[in-house]
Amino acid sequence: MNRFRRQILAGCLGLTAATAGALWLHLSYRARPDYAFLSGWVLLAGMFVLALYNVRKKLPFLPLGKSETWLQIHIYLGFFTTFLFLFHLNFRLPRGLFEITLAGLFVLVSGSGFLGLFFSRVLPRRLATRGGEAIFEKIPAQRHALRMEAETLALGRDANSPVIAEFYVKRLAVFLAGPRNFWPHLMESCRPVGGLLAELADLRRVATEGDRERIDQLARLVRQKDGLDYQRALQLTLRLWLFVHIPLTYGLMIFTVLHIVLVYAFSGGAQ
Amino acid sequence: MSEPPPAPDFDAQNYARPNQNWICGHAGEGGQCRLGPDARGRCGAASECQPRLETKPGETKGRWHCTRPGGACESGPLPDGRCGGSLPSCAPVPTLRWLRGRMTFAVIAISCAALLIVLGHPPYRNGFINPGEISQAHSGAVFALRAATNQLPASCGSCHGAGNAGPGGLVNAAWHAEPGIFDLEKMAGATVGEPMAMDAACLKCHGGRNLHQVDAPPIACVFCHTEHAGLNMAPTTDANCNFCHGDAAKMMVSPTTPVIHHFADDHPQFRFITERRRDPDTLQFNHQLHLTGATIPRLPGGGKLDCEYCHQPDAAGAYMQPVAFEKNCRVCHSLQFDPQTPELTLPHGSGEFVSAFLRSLPNQYLQLAQKRSAPDPTGFVENKLAGLRAQFGSGEDLEQRIFFSTATFGPAANIGTLAGATRAIFPGCALCHEVKHMAGAAPEITPPVIPGRWLTRAKFNHAKHLGISCAQCHAASQSQSSADIILPPKETCAACHSPRGGVANSCAECHHYHQPQMAVK
């Protein structure tokens, strides 16, 4: 068993034990008058530690432990606070517009976190299978280079095939102009590029010997461009879930602070 | 751990850091400039370098030199010192990191703005933060009127002190709540059901805690009454009742009441059974005879006398109307005392009336004669009085017979509107009533006292039990004495009202908590 598997096993065992303990506490003390307050404070503490991970990432120069350790804590604590959230709600649905908004924010933040965890576990393996090692920020430049090369092949001074030129203008120019086939790449579908390569293969049958070589080179460029699109789609997905997770975390914090004020202001202990 | 090898085309000199907010607009074409955009996203590519002026000794003008990194350009600086190789400007492109930052800022701004708008306008705010529908009792026009009577606002503020406060007031109320925001120790040590500050708001309208037991411990109103749970407040649960009744220590204050958890399990038998109580009423009535006796005639419609004939539900259907002589008894017991004269019957309701009626018998017969248009009224009266004397003796004897006789025999004859064999002669008031001799006055008949309800601590609804026959609960056909309390034992109720029976069996199904006199101001 390698270190990674040992970490997962230990994390899952710890998470199970903590959740079982929290469930026992919930069942034992849920009838207490201020249980909702106490469970709420524990939940808030968990959310606070979760949010600290972002602070840790912004302060890499401080000796606050390894980011890898923080990430592990963030993941397992994320699962645990989701259970705490259910205990805090006492397994009932939220009531009223404010509670529904607050609970909805929590669900979106947690859900996007779980989705991000899933992506970060699945997509990196897939990234290693196609498209080489493309740096996300360099992909536009690489795509531009491929486009220039293809344009030279199809429309350059040495090109003298109107068939290839027409095919390039009608089909390849659009394909090479920008990122394409985001969803098919995410779904691991090769059908779009397969169709384009099939059209190139058809073109090859009616082309002259000299043009066939150019068509083969164009097919190579199409495959490289498709690999770049694949890399871009997966790497973008690895970044896009944070567009939900991080901004809504701040929204959740704002609503949580208001929630605390409201529950105390309207509690039975308020004058 | 060794460093991983760089990617094949990695250019360390031209590395665009993803934590920058902006990248050169030409980066997508592979021709990004060395300077790149500034922190605000403005293109910084005005020229390739900043020419440097070098003035040799003795020179006055000096000479501009190219400072381009990587070597001077061929054209060199212009005579006025500007760079001769100006770079094409671009429209810098924001990075994903910058976009995410903007989105975060937008979420924060929208959240704060929306909350300030909503919290600043009470109508919006109350609708937004209300965790659930308020009960009918605490909303609507009737509540508004009642709140006005008690000088309370007809809004959230009538119960919540912070109900009408602005954002600052909310924070202030939260800060001064008891226990406070950071008073976790006090919060953890709170006792279940202990009174709260908000109880004072309840007591503004619900004057006093009229608890069902004077020595019951004070309990927070919200312990049993949950608001914001719909048009009807959430019903009191068994857990609320068991808070005291299921706790032996708390029940020490009431030694006569055992510890109770559930009706079907440890609820005691009804006290009228355990204490063998009898109905102390002086009225004599034999249920068995009336329900199963062979001598009981058919009713005017031909039907058999049954429970429903005498016991009719009230308007709500919950309880039974009182049995009344005129409505339920006279159809058989017509109080006819003269077998030959069915038109004359004794008045019911007072011994004095009966005595006065008997003393006025000549006049009664005379009026009857006039009513019948008898040819000789005086003779008619004399004839009737003579018949009575022959049967009963003197007037005093007749009165004694009518008041005190309990004879249950007599010749079969028609009585009133009923056809069939029954007693023709009125046996006497004492058959049903307790009649007392009174010296020098008319005998006194003890008025019957028939309680409307026996189990006054509980509620019952006959309308909900229409699916079962009366006899399933009330063993009236076996009761020969009116002293019998014909109510079912607990086991009969628990046969259905139990988890096994499947019918609701919570405490609140039968019991109220507060004293009946508790009212809303």
Image (tube, coloured by chain):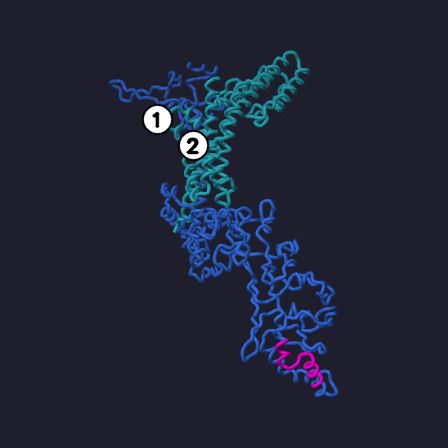
Chain colours: A cyan, B blue
Q: Mark 2 lies on which chain?
A: A
Relative placement, left or right, of B151 versus B436 is left
Find residue A33 and report its horizontal and vertical position in percent.
43, 45
Residue that badge 1 annotates: A62
For the magenta stretch, what is the residue range? Answer: B382-401
On the image, which quarter does residue A229 sit in?
top right
Residue A50: which numbered mark, if any? 2
The answer to whether residue B125 is above or below residue B204 is above
| 10 Å crowding of disc 2: few (<14), some (14-19), many (20+) | many
Which residue is outermost to the top? A209
Task: Count the marks.
Answer: 2
Amino acid type indicated by mark 2: Leu
Find residue A32 and report its horizontal and vertical position in percent.
44, 43
Tell whether position B400 is magenta.
yes
Nearer to the camera, A253 or B468: B468
At horizontal 68% and vertical 78% (from top left) the residue drawn is: B344
Find residue A270 and report its horizontal and vertical position in percent.
39, 49
Q: Nearer the viewer, mark 1 or mark 2?
A: 2
Residue B93, can we see it?
no
On the image, which quarter does residue B326 sit in?
bottom right
| 10 Å crowding of disc 1: few (<14), some (14-19), many (20+) | few
Q: In the structure shown, which secondary structural element does the residue marked by tag 1 occupy?
A: loop
Q: In the structure shown, which secondary structural element does the residue marked by tag 2 occupy?
A: helix
At horizontal 54% and vertical 78% (from top left) the residue drawn is: B439
Nearer to the camera, A236 or B506: B506
Nearer to the camera, B44 or A243: A243
